Image (cartoon, grey):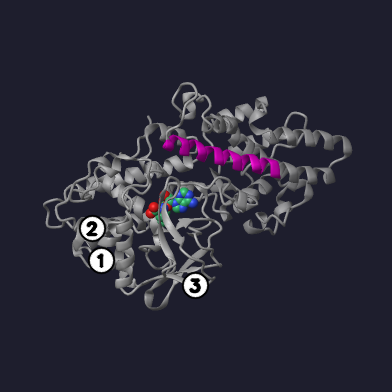
C-alpha cells in the first residue's frame, strides 16, 4: 500500500486564528514563499534593530524566486569579515526559552533527539499568540509551506521515492510520529487546563508545517550542547556549498552573520547549511543539489549482499576465485563486532559516496575482511586500520576487496526498477516508465514538481553509484595489471569492465540466485 504523506489541505483552509488573512495566497502551491511582502520583511528588519540587534544597510531582502524562494542580497559591495547581522539572545527562538508551564510540559513529551519537533511546538505557540507574541514580526514573515519537503508529497511522488528506501522510510517515520503525537497529546488539548494553544486545535498537518519550518531554518551556532534555535532574518539566507557568509557566536549570547569573503554588490548572501547529502537536504530543506559532492547512497550491511556482489564482480571470464568466507570465521566475527556490525546494538549502515573516496571505511573494511586469505592476513589489524584506504592488506587482497565493493555497487544499480537513463528521460519530459518506477502511466508528459523531485533524487543516487563503479573499476585495473600475469590480466580487465557496466550487464546464474535470496538491498 502506498503511504500518503501529510496533506496540505490545511494550507488552503487554515483555521482563521492560525493564519489570519492567508487563505487565498496558499492555493499557489508551487511558490515557496507565499506571503512575505516587502513590508513584512521591512518590519522584520525594524524589529531586529529595535530589539538591540544590528542589520547592516548592505543587507537587502530579495523577493522570492521560483527555485530558492526569498533570500538575502548585498545592496552594495562589502569586505570579508564585515558584520552583516547581529541577533541578540532575545531575538533567537529556542524551545528552552519559553517559561509557559503548559508548553514546557508538552515539549517534555517529545523525545530528546526530536529537537525539531520540540522547537516546532514553540513556533506554534508564538504563531497562535499572534500580535501578542514578541516574535510576531518573525513568525508573520515565515513561508506558509515548504512544498519540496517530502512529508507533503503526493502518493505518486512517495511511490517514486520508494526506489530509495533510506529516504522514503524516514519520511514515513516522520509522518507516523506526527500522527501519533497529535492523536496522543494534541487532540484532547482544546478546552483542557493543560492547553498551551489557547483553545486553537492543532493537528498533525499543522504541526508538520511547524516541523518543516524548524528543520529547514534552525541553526546550532552555540555548539552541540545548546538547543538549535531559529535565527530571524539570518534564516533568510539560502544555501551554497561555496558560501560567501558564515554564522558564528557573538558577544553576550548574540549570533552574528559576517561576510566570509569580499562580496560584490547585488550578490546573494549565501550560507553553507553543512556538508549535507541530498537525502538530508531533501528531507529537511525540500531541495537537493545536482551532482552534490557530499551525496551518499546508504545500504544496510548484509553478508549475503557481499556474497552476491562478489559473484557479480567475478564475471564469467574471470579466473576462478575461491568463494570468500563471509562472516562465519572467528576472526571475522571479532572484527565485525569491533566494527559494530554484529551484536544487539549493531549499526548496520554502510555508505557509498563521492566525498567518502567512493565508499565508507566500514564498507571497505568488510570487503577486505571477507576477501582476506586467512586470519593471518588481518592479524594485528584494528577495524579502523582495515578501513583505511592507504593501508591495503596486500595487492591481491585489495583487488579482490575492490571487486567485491564494485560488485555490491553494481548489484544495487541493477535492483532499481528504473535505470539512470530512464529517469533522466522522464525528467526531460520523455515517456513515462512503467508504474513500478513510481510514475503515472502514459506518454510524454510533464512531471508534477514533487514527482520530479523524487525522480531527480533517485537519479542522483544512481549517478553516485555509477561514478563509484567507474572509479573503482579504474583503481582495480591499475592494481590488476601489477598482480596477475599477462593473459589473465586481459580476462580480469574484461570482467571488471563488465561489472562496471552495472545495469547493462546480465547476471550470471549464480548471482541471479543470490539476488533472489537477498531480497531488498536497502533499509
Ligand atoms: C533557511 S530558508 C532560506 C530562506 C527561504 N528561501 C525563504 O524563502 O524563506 C531554507 C529554504 O530556502 C530554500 N533554499 C535555500 N537554499 C536553496 C538552494 N540552494 N536551492 C533551492 N532552494 C533553497 C529551501 O526551500 C529551504 O528549505
Which residue is pictured at 58% across the width and 56% down the height? 338
| Lower position in the chain sequence, tag 1 or tag 2 | 1
What numbered label is drawn on residue 125? 2
Which residue is pictured at 65% across the width and 43% down the height? 468
Q: Determine whether the residue tagged by mark 1 lies in a helix, strand or loop.
A: loop
Q: CA distance from mark 1 to mark 2?
A: 10 Å
Magenta extent: 449-471
- Looking at the picture, tell me which residue is in the foreground, 521 or 1: 1
Q: Which residue is mark 3?
A: 82
Q: Is residue 411 left or right of residue 443?
A: right
Where residue 499 sits in the image (x, y, percent)? 70, 34
In magenta segment, residue 459 = yes
Graded by Cα atoms within 10 Å as few (under 14), some (14 to 19) or many (20 or more), the crowding at tag 2 reads many
Magenta region, main secondary structure: helix
Residue most extreme to the bottom = 252
Seen in the picture, residue 50 relative to 136 is either above or below; the reply is below
What numbered label is drawn on residue 259? none
Tag in front: 3 or 2: 3
Give yes or no for contact between labels 1 and 2 (Cβ–Cβ under 8 Å): yes
Q: Is mark 1 within 8 Å of ligand 1?
A: no
Amino acid at each position: 500500500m502506498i503511504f500518503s504523506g501529510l496533506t496540505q489541505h490545511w494550507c488552503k483552509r487554515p483555521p482563521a486564528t492560525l493564519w489570519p488573512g492567508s487563505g487565498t495566497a496558499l492555493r499557489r502551491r508551487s511558490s515557496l514563499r507565499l506571503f512575505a511582502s516587502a513590508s513584512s520583511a521591512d518590519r522584520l528588519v525594524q524589529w531586529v534593530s529595535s530589539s538591540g540587534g544590528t542589520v547592516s544597510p548592505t543587507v537587502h531582502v530579495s523577493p522570492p524566486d521560483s527555485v530558492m524562494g526569498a533570500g538575502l542580497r548585498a545592496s552594495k559591495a562589502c569586505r570579508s569579515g564585515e558584520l552583516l547581522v547581529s541577533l541578540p539572545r532575545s531575538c533567537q527562538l529556542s524551545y528552552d526559552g519559553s517559561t509557559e508551564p503548559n508548553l514546557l510540559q508538552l515539549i517534555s513529551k517529545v523525545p530528546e533527539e526530536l529537537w525539531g519537533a520540540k522547537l516546532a511546538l514553540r513556533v506554534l505557540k508564538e504563531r497562535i499568540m499572534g500580535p501578542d507574541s514578541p516574535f510576531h514580526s518573525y513568525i508573520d514573515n515565515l513561508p506558509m509551506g515548504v512544498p519540496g519537503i517530502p512529508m507533503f508529497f503526493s502518493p505518486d511522488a512517495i511511490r517514486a521515492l520508494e526506489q530509495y528506501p533510506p529516504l522514503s522510510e524516514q519520511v514515513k517515520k516522520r509522518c507516523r510520529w506526527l500522527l501519533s503525537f497529535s492523536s496522543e497529546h494534541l487532540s484532547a488539548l482544546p478546552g483542557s487546563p493543560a492547553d498551551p494553544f489557547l483553545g486553537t486545535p492543532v493537528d498533525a498537518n499543522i504541526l508538520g508545517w511547524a516541523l518543516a519550518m524548524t528543520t529547514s531554518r534552525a541553526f546550532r551556532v552555540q555548539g552541540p550542547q545548546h538547543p538549535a534555535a531559529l535565527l530571524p532574518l539570518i534564516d533568510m539566507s539560502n544555501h551554497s556549498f561555496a558560501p560567501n557568509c558564515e554564522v558564528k557566536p557573538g558577544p553576550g549570547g548574540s549570533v552574528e552573520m559576517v561576510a566570509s569573503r569580499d562580496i560584490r554588490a547585488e550578490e546573494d548572501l549565501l550560507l553553507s547549511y553543512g556538508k549535507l547529502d541530498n537525502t538530508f537536504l531533501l528531507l529537511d530543506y525540500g531541495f537537493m543539489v545536482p551532482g552534490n559532492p557530499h551525496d551518499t547512497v546508504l545500504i544496510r550491511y548484509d553478508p549475503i549482499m557481499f556474497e552476491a556482489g562478489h559473484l557479480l564482480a567475478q564475471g564469467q571470464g574471470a579466473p576462478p576465485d575461491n568463494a570468500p568466507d563471509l562472516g562465519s570465521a572467528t576472526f571475522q566475527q571479532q572484527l565485525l563486532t569491533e566494527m559494530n556490525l554484529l551484536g544487539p546494538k549493531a549499526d548496520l549502515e554502510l555508505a557509498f559516496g563521492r566525498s567518502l573516496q567512493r565508499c565508507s571505511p566500514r564498507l571497505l573494511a568488510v570487503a577486505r575482511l571477507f576477501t582476506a586469505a586467512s586470519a593471518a592476513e588481518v592479524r594485528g589489524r584494528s577495524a579502523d586500520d582495515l578501513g583505511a584506504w592507504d593501508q591495503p592488506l596486500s595487492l591481491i587482497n585489495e583487488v579482490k576487496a575492490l571487486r567485491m565493493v564494485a560488485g555490491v555497487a553494481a548489484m544495487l544499480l541493477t535492483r532499481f526498477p528504473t535505470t539512470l537513463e530512464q529517469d533522466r528521460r522522464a525528467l526531460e519530459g520523455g515517456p513515462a516508465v512503467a508504474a513500478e518506477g513510481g510514475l503515472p502511466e502514459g506518454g510524454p508528459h510533464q512531471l508534477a514538481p514533487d514527482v520530479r523531485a523524487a525522480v531527480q533524487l533517485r537519479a542522483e543516487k544512481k549517478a553516485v553509484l555509477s561514478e563509484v563503479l567507474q572509479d573503482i573499476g579504474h583503481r582495480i585495473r591499475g592494481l590488476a595489471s601489477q598482480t596477475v600475469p599477462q593473459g589473465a590480466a586481459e580476462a580480469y580487465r574484461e570482467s571488471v569492465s563488465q561489472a562496471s557496466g552495472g545495469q547493462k550487464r546480465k547476471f550470471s546464474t549464480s548471482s541471479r540466485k543470490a539476488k533472489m535470496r537477498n531480497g531488498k538491498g536497502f533499509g
